[in-house]
Amino acid sequence: SLISTKQMLLKAQEEGYSIPAFNIHNLETIQVVLQAASDLKSPVILAATPSTVKYAGEEYLLAIIEKASEINNIPVTFHLDHHENVDDIKRIIALGCKSVMIDASKHEFKENVEIVKDIVDFAYSYGATVEAELGKLGGVEDDLIVDEKDSFLTDPNEAVEFVKLTGVDSLAVAIGTAHGLYKSEPKLDFDRLEKIRSMVDVPLVLHGASGVPYDAVQKATDLGICKVNIATELKIPFSSAIRDYFKENPDASDPRQYLVPAKKAMYDVVVDKIKMCKSENKA
Ligand code: 13P
Ligand code: ZN
Ligand code: NA
């Protein structure tokens, strides 16, 4: 069933695991994530970036996920990921979306606060959960491209101020991860995370989890992360399997055939990531 992201995250925070947030793109990726989550009895967040909303349409996404959450007997939320357009966010909340990330992290502190506060105030009357980011991740997430030299880590003192001034429900922190895969193994700043966690009580979110080793994500979870965002590592096996299928079957044309191995390949990764988050049997 569809439940509140805030409640989901607070339970995870209290019990010491993370909620996996998987970026979905279409019916098939929604089916795969929910099948895996349902098989493992894990709560799950289905995340849609602006490109996904543009591609699939918010009304289709809302309707499909609402229905899917009825069919699968696990806690599910539909979440807008890295949305920057305030009007789009408000419109989609008004249509029924209960969970959003307003990403104003490219702005200066004061402007970030103002933009986030505006969304928090709006979301409140709809009972929607709001995530914001302080600090800035490097890497590529759909249309959001941040050069490594322009990325910066979250300052713990600023994080305290930010949460107090905005009233945000959860905070995405920059502690050394980046969107996409890594050239070499990422070094996470666990001391920084620990410090932020000791000073800020709202649930903390780890973006850019693709390519981050299992044990680093688990250590981050032990130190206070309770939502883990995963996109790239799901897209790669899905598309590789389609490529392989067409290599073997160059004349294939039936999506109900060539998408089957793609779904299977993605399913296995989703299962693996749920285990990494230790959210199995927490539904
Ligand atoms: P990755 O693509 O590195 O998994 O990042 C996902 C993410 O942070 C989505 O918001
Ligand atoms: Zn992200
Ligand atoms: Na990543």
Image (spheres, rainbow, N blue to C red):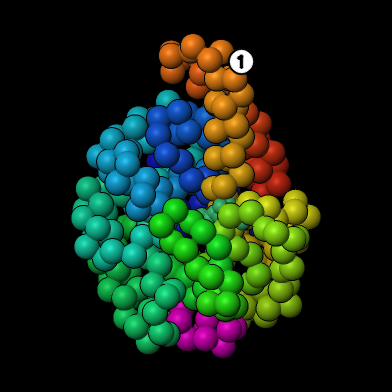
Q: From the top left corner, tell me how far across and down residue 140 is, in percent.
A: 51, 59
Task: Name the residue at 32% across, 57% down.
Answer: 127
When the figure is inspected, residue 227 is found, relative to residue 189, above or below; the finding is above
Could you tell whether 90 is left or right of 117 in the image? left
Q: Quadrant of the N terminus?
A: top left
Give the dominant element type of the magenta stretch: helix, strand or loop.
helix
Neighbours of disc 1 within 10 Å: few (<14), some (14-19), many (20+)? few
Q: From the top left corner, tell me how far across and down residue 84 is, in percent.
A: 34, 65
Q: Nearer the viewer, residue 100 or 16?
A: 100
**Which segment did they paint magenta?**
155-163
When the figure is inspected, residue 150 is found, relative to residue 143, above or below; the finding is below
Task: Name the residue at 52% across, 86% down.
Answer: 158
Could you tell whether 281 is left or right of 74 in the image? right
> Would residue 36 be visible to someone looking at this image?
no
Q: Nearer the viewer, residue 149 or 104?
A: 149
Could you tell whether 253 is left or right of 195 in the image? left
Task: Name the residue at 60% across, 32% down.
Answer: 240
Determine the quadrant in which ligand 1 lies: bottom right
